[in-house]
Structure formats: structure tokens, C-alpha cells
Image (tube, rainbow, N blue to C red):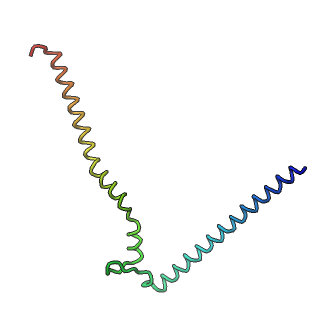
């Protein structure tokens, strides 16, 4: 009987903890939605409030968003290397295939005409 009550208390504590976490998550989500709505309203009322100056040029929200989408330096270097290495791999594979085929032809000719 004591064991059952202890288990029941632990279950209630777990549910209470999960409930508190869920309430906090919903509260945070509500705050995020409120902030998003407030920013949208402010942007509608004052479009110039969301501009950023970078190197003497004024950037709009869309331009800042586009800049944020640019990958980091390491990713760009990796993509560039892949662009160069892709055609080189194809060339190496084609060359290897051609040489292999040529070697097979030479071997066959040597077997077919041993004295030439």
C-alpha cells in the first residue's frame, strides 16, 4: 500500500512538472506571437524604423534578411571546392575508363596477333 502511494505521488509530481513546463512553453509562445504582432504593426506604421546602415549604405529589412541567408565562409569555401572538384572527378573517371579500354584493346590485339 505504501509503495502504491509512493508511485502515485511520483506520477503526480511528474504530471505537475510536465504541466508547469507546458504552461511556460505556451506562455513563451504567446509572448513571441505578441512580439511578432507588435513588430509587424510598427513596421506597417514606420517602415523606415527597420533600416540598417552598413558601410554607408542603408539596407532594408529584406536586404538584411538576404544577407542573413548567406552561408558562412567555411561553407562557401566548401561549395566552391566542390564546384571545381566535380568536373575534375568526371575527367579523371573518363580518363581512367579510356585507358582501361585502350589497355584491353592492346591486350586483345597482342593475343590475336602474337608475332606482330
13 on left or right of 1: left
Query: Which residue is located at x 42 percent, y 84 percent?
Result: 48
Query: Which residue is located at x 84 percent, y 53 percent?
Result: 6
Q: Does residue 73 sit above or below 59 in this rendering?
A: above
Numbered disc total: 0
Q: Nearer the viewer, residue 78 or 58?
A: 78
- Which image quadrant is residue 32 in? bottom right
76 on left or right of 23: left
x and y, in percent, of residue 83 in the image: 29, 52
Quadrant housing the C terminus: top left
Taking the view exactly as shown, the residue that stands out farthest to the left is: 116
Taking the view exactly as shown, the residue that stands out farthest to the right is: 1
x and y, in percent, of residue 15 in the image: 76, 59
Q: Does residue 55 sit above or below 80 in this rendering?
A: below
Query: Which residue is located at x 42 percent, y 76 percent?
Result: 61
Q: Does residue 21 sit above or below 57 in this rendering?
A: above
x and y, in percent, of residue 63 in the image: 38, 73
- Which image quadrant is residue 74 in? bottom left
Query: Which residue is located at x 29 percent, y 47 percent?
Result: 86
17 on left or right of 115: right
6 on left or right of 102: right
Taking the view exactly as shown, the residue that stands out farthest to the top is: 115
- Which image quadrant is residue 97 in? top left
x and y, in percent, of residue 53 in the image: 37, 80
Amino acid at each position: 500500500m505504501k509503495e502504491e502511494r509512493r508511485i502515485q505521488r511520483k506520477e503526480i509530481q511528474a504530471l505537475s512538472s510536465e504541466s508547469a513546463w507546458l504552461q511556460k512553453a505556451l506562455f513563451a509562445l504567446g509572448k513571441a506571437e505578441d512580439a511578432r504582432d507588435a513588430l509587424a504593426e510598427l513596421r506597417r506604421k514606420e517602415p523606415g524604423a527597420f533600416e540598417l546602415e552598413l558601410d554607408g549604405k542603408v539596407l532594408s529589412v529584406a536586404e538584411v534578411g538576404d544577407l542573413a541567408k548567406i552561408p558562412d565562409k567555411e561553407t562557401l569555401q566548401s561549395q566552391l571546392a566542390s564546384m571545381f572538384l566535380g568536373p575534375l572527378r568526371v575527367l579523371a573517371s573518363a580518363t581512367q575508363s579510356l585507358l582501361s579500354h585502350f589497355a584491353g584493346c592492346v591486350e586483345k590485339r597482342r593475343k590475336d596477333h602474337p608475332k606482330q
